[in-house]
Amino acid sequence: MALLRVTSPHAHGPASTQKVMQQVLLATVPGVIALIHFFGFGVLVNIAWAALLALAFESLALKLRGRELGFYLKDCSALVTAVLLGVALPPYSPWWLIAVGMASAILLAKHLYGGLGYNPFNPAMVGYVVLLISFPVQMTTWEAPRGVGEVPGLLDALRACFTPASFDGTTAATPLDVLKQNNSLLLENLWAAEPVFGRWAGIGWEWANIAFLAGGLWLLYRRIFTWHAPLAFLAVLALMAALFYDGGSSASGGSPLFHLLSGATMFGAFFIVTDPVTSAVSVRGRLVYGALAGLLVYLIRVWGNYPDAVAFAVLIMNFAAPFIDHYTQPRTYGHRKPAKRREES
Amino acid sequence: MRKIFDFHGGIHPPENKQQSLGEPIRDAGIPAQLVVPLSQHIGAPSSPIVAVGDRVLKGQVIAEAAGFVSVPQHAPSSGTVAAIEERPIPHPSGFHALCIVIDCDGRDEWLPHRGLENYEGESPSDLLEHIREAGIAGMGGAGFPSAVKLKEKPGASIDTLIINGTECEPYITADDALMREHAAEIVAGAEILRHIVGPKNTLIGVEDNKPEGIAALQAAAEGTGIEIVVFPTKYPSGGEKQLIEILTGRQVPSGGLPADVGVVCQNVGTAVAVYDAIVHGRPLISRITTITGEAVSRPGNYRVLLGSPMQHLLDLAGFDPARNQRLVMGGPMMGFTLTDSAVPVVKTTNCLLAPSAEELPAPPPAQACIRCGLCAEACPASLLPQQLFWFARGKEYDKLEEHNLFDCIECGACSWACPSHIPLVQYYRASKADILQQRRDHEKSEQSRIRFEARQERLAREEAEKEAKRLARKKAAELRAQQQAAESGDDSGAEVDPIQAAIERAKAKKAAQQQAAGGESEQDKLEKAVASTRKRLDTASAKLEQARAEGSDLIDALQSGVDKTRAKLEAAEKALAEHLASQDNPPPASEPAVAKPRSAAEIAIAKAKAARAAEADLSPQEKARKQLDSLRQRLDKSEQRLAQSREAGEDEKIVEALAATVQRLKEKISALESEAEKVESP
């Protein structure tokens, strides 16, 4: 009788990385549906094309690194990156834009650092920022949402992506952009003058944010991540907005609700800030990490050069994560104080 | 209602306890052979006091405690000691250790024993002695000698005694069965422990997944003042530190003991063993063990004699080796695999788990850590397992210690929760071992450094002492020279350095010689050479004689010196004779030089030569005897000398040297004697 000789523990829980990733993918569905509804099939084409590229680049990198394809592909992490970048990019982006973005995300940000778990920066956000800096025109051209303009069909979406023919749909500035450019109208008047604004924020954007919030809450319920980072992120963003709301004057930064439901706020709070690999690890660390990311988002949105800021804020906080970890170790059982940091002399 | 506290982390693995709770506790009977390991506890292994072939009775002491942290072992049944030898024992590394093997006679004959009639009249220290004599070591898992744990710690006042009936590990139901069927004994044992410890509160802590056990305990504890505290089920609430936090809200300081926060913990099984020992005078020779897992068809709890081979239990429980894939002693979270089903049940064997491959599948390959933090959420010690893993992989031992690796209790909650199936606990265990090894190595090198430095220091000190002595001698010599100079009235000499004076004397002598040589004939020169060589020979011979008389080690060197001098003398005499012959003038001066009766030294040399020549003619036996006689004389002399110097209280070094000489002589004599015997009786 050959007895298996292993050390404890012998039992294992049901959790698996693959299941975690699949649940994250599933949780993006409401948000993606909302985006498709308001911005058309360009969103879906983005995601599908990005997913194909992600699998291709991931396979290529694994092959170059001499890793077993099946074992690593099944963790679904490349698909998560693809969906996150596909959602973040403007719909109807050309195929090469997405390809450059995915190559940066998978090859540069992920595999050059050693693959899943070893990347210091969120791959999707690296891809996004590379594109935003390199191709600012394409990256800031958003289709007008349904209700403001006409939304093209699936064929148009495919054509826009894969043929060089220029796309002649209606484009419109995003609500965050409009608010940023405003320097003369009271918010009330701006709301009336611009067709992009809806009930609380931009038309379409507000519902997409609510849908991502729903997906995020489901992930919280599934205990895929803890509430600390997203709540701190949203709370600080709302707090900053409240502090600088200014009663709705022409210099106002926008209401807390406007910021919470605009741009990539909810998407960032539940799908980017919660990325475990690149964020801080302890409970206190995640509170600090989320709060500072929220602060940065507001600072860049209102006083920076870019209308939205989740990608930059998250990348900057990725830099800071090890530093935060360094100072936020929890108090271990039986110790009076959190582990004392050694003085580096 | 007592306030219940929560501890950080914890997990809820499937309990799998129902399988082994279907039937009441069964008796496992007496196996043909019992193997009693001498080490079933933490601390020094006990030392056997029986011999192979001895008949032993049930409950008889067969090995006694060796030291303070140790317990004795008793014969679990009557029979004959078949062997005292190395056997495989239940150990994570599959060690062998010394065991007493008893062939049971099946009569199960007890050694007459009697409990204490009124333990309340006994002092705690006497009761502790009884507990120790009964061989009781913690039955929850670690096996720490209970008497040591219960002994009052100086400076610590215990206000809470906790009886641990938590049993949080999946599958195990031994304590649950004990609580259901022997609640009265548990409570009685707790009362004895309370009498020993004298706490304000005595609590029995039980998880809420054992309602029958709780009900039985509550009924038994009615009116005793012992409180049954029920709290939510969560692994690892049965860990001593966690249980203390649940029941008191206090945390045992890192590296400290429960006594530091006024708590003593004992397992329910230990409480029953204490009751048996005090009230019935029965030592710890059996325990309740759960046998469960899909590879046994009749899982359940058995009362097992300690030393019963695991195979005996497996046979009872309907074991199917074809379905089994590993044997675990303990539970699935903290138990360890056995390499052999022949290993015996010991005092800490609470469970024998024989799972099928589907039940506890082999661990899948680990994926990358995504730092999800599920491990940190599960950790009952509030550690950051993902960070520890990262540092363990990088062998960053400083960081590991900084992140309190040694506060990890290896409960396995992090590994259980990890979605990437990383064997976290195994990493921590290996790192702990590495760090401990590093510490030991460091200590060793530190010790040799200290030793080396001490040696260097000693050598330098000795050198300095020598130098100081030299200086002192020099000073004394100067002083003497001054005194002499003053005495002789030579005022100029008083200022002359003695060495300088000696050099000058030598110079003057040389000059005189040269002068003489210049003015003297060849013959005179040669005559002088002969005379001075003879003088040197005389002194050398005298020295040699003296050395012989004292039995000094210098004889050989002196002898060769004498020989050389003699050769020189002969050469000088020859040269003189030749010179005289060449002058054809019989020298009158050479006559006395050659014919003159020699000095005492020369006579001695002649004697020695004659003796040697005589010796050469002697038979080997006679030679040896002679040698022996002379050695004996020398020994007598040396001994006298030693006695004298001892009486005179001379310098230790001298006494030691003399003693060494005596010793050496004795050795020589005995060597010669044995040789002589050999020669005489071929």
Image: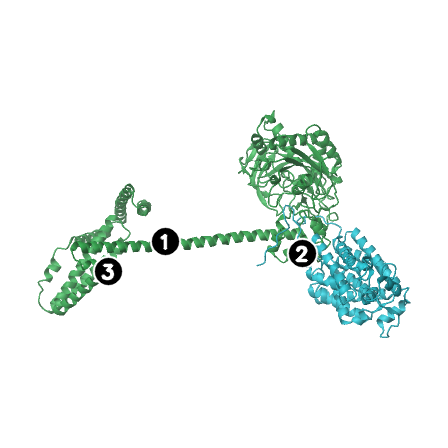
* Residues beneath discs 2 and 3 located on the same chain: no
The chain containing the residue under callout 1 comes to: B
Question: Which residue is at the front of the view, A284 or B154?
Answer: A284
Instruction: Name the quarter where the C terminus of chain A is drawn.
Output: bottom right
Q: The cyan chain is which one?
A: A
Q: In this view, does B291 lie to the left or right of B510?
A: right
Residue lying at 63% horizontally and 31% vertically, measured from the top left? B194
Q: In which quarter of the image is residue A185?
A: bottom right
The secondary element bearing badge 1 is classed as helix
- The image shows residue A79 at horizontal and vertical percentages of 78, 62
Name the residue beneath numbered marker 2: A325
Determine contact: label 2, label 1, CB under 8 Å. Answer: no
Observer-side mark, 2 or 1, equals 2
Mark 2: which amino acid? Asp
Question: Which residue is at the front of the view, A267 or B308?
Answer: A267
The chain containing the residue under callout 3 comes to: B
Question: Which residue is at the front of the view, A43 or A248?
Answer: A248
The chain containing the residue under callout 2 comes to: A
- On residue B499, the disc is 3
**10 Å crowding of disc 3: few (<14), some (14-19), many (20+):** few
The secondary element bearing badge 3 is classed as helix
- Separation of disc 2 and disc 3 at Cα? 79 Å
B350 shown above or below A216: above
**10 Å crowding of disc 1: few (<14), some (14-19), many (20+):** few
The colour with which the image depicts chain B is green
B317 shown above or below B513: above
Mark 3: which amino acid? Ile
Name the residue beneath numbered marker 1: B462
